[in-house]
Amino acid sequence: MSKLTHLGEDGAARMVDIGGKAASERVAIASGRIAMNAETLAAVRDGNAPKGDVLGTARIAGIMAAKRTGDLIPLCHPLALGAVELDFTFEEDAIRATARASLTGKTGVEMEAMVAVSTALLTIYDMAKAVDKGMVIGEVRLIEKRGGKSGHWKVEL
């Protein structure tokens, strides 16, 4: 098993020291989905949800959350993100959210991309729960990351 970077020699939690690392271009792409019934999916797609523009609001919420990741995840470095993009695609019984976070810096943006996706999906749930309380959020995962010491990684689908 590889050494866990957020644990010190004594086993105590610690923030990773990135002070000596060189800045490089970092990109992370994450994805997740929210499954729902056909009525809810149609309401979101058609813009007829009770609370208004579900996907527009979810996009803003996800971007805002990515910018606050260092405040939400213990030991996560606060980052000056270069960009966060959030897109949605309709599936047969779900909406898929995909986030891309990037910067030039000393640490990766995987957590920012996953926080963006998670928050966007939670926002969709909040805005559509009047129609469907049984929606299910899942499959939140890293799809790809580029940059840094570990280089390029992409999930094998």
Image (spheres, helix red, strand yellow):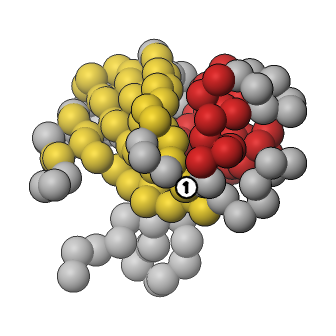
Residue placed most toward the observer, 89 or 143 = 89
Q: Is residue 140 visible?
A: yes
- Give the percent coordinates (x, y) of residue 138: 51, 61
Residue drawn 31% across the image and 30% down it: 27
The residue lying at 50 percent from left, 48 percent from top is 94
The total of numbered circles placed on residues is 1
Estimate how packed mark 1 is, as few (under 14), some (14 to 19) or many (20 or more) residues with alpha carbons within 10 Å: many
Q: Amino acid at mark 1?
A: Ala
Q: Is residue 23 left or right of residue 54?
A: left
Q: Residue 107: in sight, yes or no?
A: no
Residue that numbered label 1 is attached to: 35
- The residue at the point 34 percent across, 37 percent down is 29
Look at the picture and state if 5 lies above or below 10: above
Seen as rendered, the residue at the extreme top is 82
Would residue 149 appear left or right of 142 to someone viewing this image? left
Query: Residue 108: x percent and y percent?
Result: 36, 39
Q: Secondary structure at mark 1?
A: strand
